Amino acid sequence: MTERVALVTGGGRGIGREAALLLAASGARVMVAARNQGELAAVGLEYVVADLGSPEGCALAVAETERRLGPIDLLVVNHGIGSAHERLVWEQDPEVWRQTMRVNLDGPFELTRLTVGGMCRRGFGRVVYTSSTAGQTAERSGSAYTASKHGVIGLARAVAQDAGPFGVTSNAVLPGWVRTEMAERSARTESERRGITVDQVWRERAAIYPRNRVLEPREVAQVIAFLCGDAAGGVNGEAITVALGGVW
């Protein structure tokens, strides 16, 4: 992976941060992108502040990576928004749907469109999308998030078909519950709705899995880093669940 150029979105915290650090430790030249400058600066790698829910923000992230580091070989599309603010589908605010699609699906498409052609021309590339177990199993009061994460898997598989003949792989990683800031927000929302503590929410989430715990961000990041490497050249168009043996 030495000297490969990587763009990692949502790289300021959680899974994205851990993936960026693992790629950098493997020799890649890494750019992290997100909206929070303070979090990005704390990672200690090259960074660009960008709104990845807009075509302009996606174009900025790609252009800055290529200007500072060179053509992008590894694209890790990890940014997204969760479902804590969603409602039952007949109560869903249409703007919540639209914003979720802009960030969770339109942004990944824009980043892919801007980078994969170059990978194909150069004969090598790795694209890894962070979907979710909600990309295969629907959640209640989460129509937008669930649909967007299903869509990410479809995008990954479509890119695998388009770019596979040129030495480019495209895969999706589907984490279960991970103790990230996004998941903490949903835990707080659930605790308020049900009148229980946040710790109780997390205990219930942990009980879903055979290990009776939730994932650490690094456990998901290690799978992402593997999929970015030369050893994963035979893995293409896959949706890989990282959920400790649980469904969620």
Image (cartoon, grey):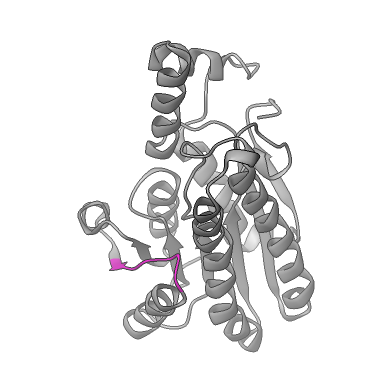
The magenta stretch spans which residues? Answer: 47-54
Q: Quadrant of the C terminus?
A: top right
Q: Is residue 72 left or right of residue 91?
A: left
Residue at coordinates 41% horizontally, 55% vertically from top-left? 10
Left or right of 56, for residue 77: right
- Point 41% across, 47% down: residue: 18
Against 139, is 124 above or below? below
Q: Residue furthest bottom?
A: 121
Relative image position of residue 43 (x, y in whole percent): 27, 53
Q: How many marks?
A: 0
Query: Magenta region, mostly helix, strand or loop?
Result: loop
Q: Residue 44 or 99: which is nearer the viewer?
A: 99
Residue 65 in which image quadrant: bottom left
Q: Please report the residue visible at 49 percent of the width from the left and 13 percent of the height from the top.
A: 203
- Relative horizontal placement of residue 113, taking residue 5 as reference (left or right): right
Q: Is residue 145 above or below residue 188?
A: below
Q: Nearer the viewer, residue 58 or 29?
A: 58
Q: Is residue 161 visible?
A: yes
Residue 108, x across and y down, in percent: 56, 65
* 190 and 243: which is toward the camera: 190
